[in-house]
Image: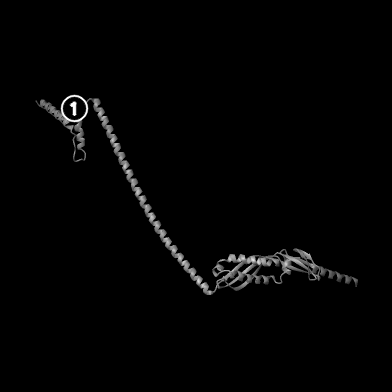
Amino acid sequence: MMPALVIIVLIFLFIWALLGLKIVRPYQRGAVERLGKYQRMVQPGLNFIIPFLERLIKVDMREQVVDVPPQEVITKDNATVTVDAIVYYEVTDPVKVLYNVANFRLATIKLAQTNLRNVIGDLTLDESLTSRERINAKLRDVLDEATDKWGAKVTRVELQRIEPPSDVTEAMHRQMKAERDRRAVVLEAEGIRQAAILKAEGEKQARILEAEGQAGAIERVADAEKYKLLTVAEGEAQAIERVYSAIHKGNPTKDLIAIKYLEALAKMAEGKATKMFVPYEASGIMSAVAVIAEALNDKAGEGEK
């Protein structure tokens, strides 16, 4: 009888011990209540509580998401828009979350809806459509301040949609289309103007370059002609100086000068000029030529006799 009782007691103690072992996950915290009164907070891992006397309440410390359902909100200029949002929060104090608010999720949703109406109501329709970041920031600050006593921190608020009435949406689409058409026309006109300007500038530049090219060519040709004339004149001057020097060194007679003069006339006559001017001093030389011719005729007559 006794061994059986001992075995029963051991089994009871084993089951009792198993009931007292509690595992808390790494992202959880455990609040222990003893006879309905908060006793202590336990950390992640294996923990033991007194069965039947204590109760472990686990609190998820990870960031949570609350979906705020759509609601109609009136803007400052009396336009009705439908808005909804998402609230991200995380628990900072599990004790406050358990004992300071009955339903944290429902309380957060109602608080977000109320403050969303207040924030949107201070803005016009255009401001509410273009101020998402401003609305998010303001709503996050209000919710974070309100949920602080609940042991939670609102980390982020995101507006999912802001939908104006259908007639307003249609008018906005027409306005947007008209604005895009206007920009397209302006851009097209600007493109045509820029193209015309670039074309005119290109033609102007081309003409300038062509004129500069022609001027450069004329200058080069003129320089070449000038160089040619100077070279020829220099050569002729040197030739005259040499001839003059050679004549003076050779002590020429009038007969020799006359012969050279005739040779020069013969070369001049070979040119393409239709007229030839003979200097006044040539009359003396021509007289010498006549004397030479007469002397040659006399010698020829004596030879015949």
Residues 295 and 7: in front is: 295
Q: Residue 149, position in %: x, y?
A: 70, 66
**Quarter residue 199 falls in:** bottom left
Q: Residues within 10 Å of mark 1 (few under 14, many from 20)?
A: some
For label 1, the residue is 254
Vertical comparison of 223 with 154: above or below: above
Task: Say which residue appears at 27% left-offset and 32% top-offset.
Answer: 239
**The N terminus sits in image quarter:** bottom right
Residues 50 and 188: in front is: 188
Residue furthest right in the image:
1
Residues 13 and 178: in front is: 178
Task: Identify residue type, mark 1.
Answer: Lys
Q: Residue 78, position in %: x, y?
A: 56, 73
Q: Residue 192, position in %: x, y?
A: 41, 61
Colour scheme: one colour
Residue furthest left in the image:
305
SS class, disc 1: helix
Q: Is residue 194 toward the left or the right of residue 166 in the image?
A: left
Task: Say which residue appears at 21% left-offset and 33% top-offset.
Answer: 264
Q: Is residue 60 toward the left or the right of residue 120 in the image?
A: right
Q: Is residue 287 toward the left or the right of residue 250 in the image?
A: left
**The C terminus sits in image quarter:** top left
Task: Say which residue appears at 43% left-offset and 61% top-offset.
Answer: 190
Q: Residue 7, position in %: x, y?
A: 86, 70
Task: Say which residue appears at 84% left-offset and 70% top-offset.
Answer: 12
Residues 85 and 213: in front is: 85
Total tally of numbered discs in the picture:
1
Q: Is residue 23 toward the left or the right of residue 253 in the image?
A: right
Vertical comparison of 285 with 220: above or below: above
